[in-house]
Image (cartoon, helix red, strand yellow):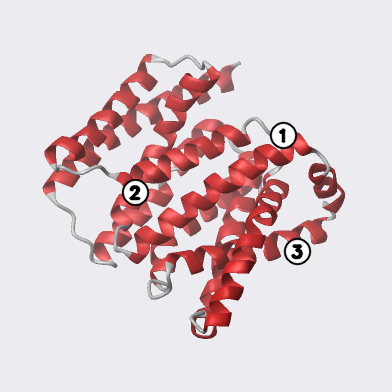
Amino acid sequence: MSDYSKGLLQGSLAYLIWGSFGLYFSLLSAVPSTEVLAHRVIWCLVITLAMILLSGKQDKLFRVMKQPKILLWLCLSSILISGNWGVYIWAVGHQQVIEASLGYFLSPLIAILLGRIFLGELLTPLQKASVAFALIGVLWQLVGLGRIPWIALSLSLLFGFYGLIRKQVEVDSLTGLTVESSLVVPIALGYTYMLSSEGSSHFDTYGIYLIGAGMVTAIPLLLFASAARKLPLGTLGFLNYIAPTLQFFSAIYILNESFSTGRLISFGFIWIGLILFSIHLYKLSRTTGDS
C-alpha cells in the first residue's frame, strides 16, 4: 500500500471517529457534561502517556516540560481545547448536535479569518467569498431566526484559536496533547474525587463509556497526525468535511433532532462558502503539485 493510500485510510478513519462523536457522547447524556469532560481529560492522558512510552518518545516529552515558554503556550491551548470539548459535550447532552456540527463546518472558514487577522495571511478572492458566505449564514440565524448560534460560534472560535496557538509551538501532536492533558488533569482529578466523596459520581454506571471518551479523543488525533504527513493539503481539506457531515445526518436521522427551513437556509450559505473554500484547496493542491 502506498503512503498516499495509507494516509487516505488513516485520515478517513480519524474523521469517521470524529463524525461519530454525536452518537458516542449521546450515550453519556445522563452524565453531567462537566463530569464527562473531567474523565475525558483523565483517560486521554492515560492513553497518550501509554503511547508515549510505547513509542519511546518520553525524552521528547521531558524536553518540552523543561521549556517554560512552550509550556505557557500549551497551558493556554489546553484551556481552549478543554473549553471546546466541554461545549461539545454539553451540546450533545442538550440535543444540539446539529448546531455543534455547524461549528465544525465553520471551523476551516474561521481559521482563514484568524490567519488573516493575527498572522497577516493574504486571502484569495475565493477565500474572501467563502468567509463572506459563512458570515451571511451566521447573520441569517441572528436576524432570520432571532438567535445567536452560540454553540457553533464557541466551538469554531475555540478550535480556531487553539489551532492558531498550536501553529506557533513546534511540538508534535502526541506530545502536545499529552502535555495539554497533564496541565489540566489536576483539576479533573480533583473534581472527580469531589464527586466520588459526595456520592454523585456516575463512574460505577458509565465507567466503560467514560474511559472510552479518552480513547475516542486520542486515537483519531494520532491517525490524523500520521495522515497529515502523507496527504496533500487539498485532500486533507476535503476529508475535513466528513466529520461534521456525519454528525449532521446522525443528529437528524438517528438522534431525531428537528431541522427547520430557516436553519437549512443558514446552513446553505455556509455550505456554499465551504464549496468555494474546497475549490481554493483544489487549486492550491494543483499548484503545489505542479511546482
**Residue 193 at what x, y percent from top left?**
61, 74
Residue type, label 3: Ala
Compare marks 3 and 1 and give the one earlier in the sequence: 3
Q: CA distance from mark 3 to mark 1?
A: 22 Å
Disc 2 crowd, CA 10 A, few/some/many (<14, 14-19, 20+):
many
The mark found on residue 151 in the picture is 2
Instruction: Please identify the quadrant where the C terminus is shown.
Output: top right
Label 1–label 2 contact, CB within 8 A: no
**Residue 254 at what x, y percent from top left?**
29, 67
Residue depicted at 72% across the width and 41% down the height: 71
Residue depicted at 28% across the width and 35% down the height: 270
The answer to whether residue 95 is above or below residue 111 is below
Mark nearest the camera among 2 and 3 is: 2
Residue depicted at 34% across the width and 48% down the height: 151
Residue for badge 3: 50
Name the foreground residue: 185 vs 211. Answer: 185
Residue for badge 1: 170
Name the foreground residue: 36 vs 198. Answer: 198
Q: Is residue 285 visible?
A: yes
Disc 3 crowd, CA 10 A, few/some/many (<14, 14-19, 20+):
few
Disc 1 crowd, CA 10 A, few/some/many (<14, 14-19, 20+):
few
**With 287 as the anchor, is 2 left or right in this view?**
right
**With 152 as the anchor, is 167 left or right in this view?**
right
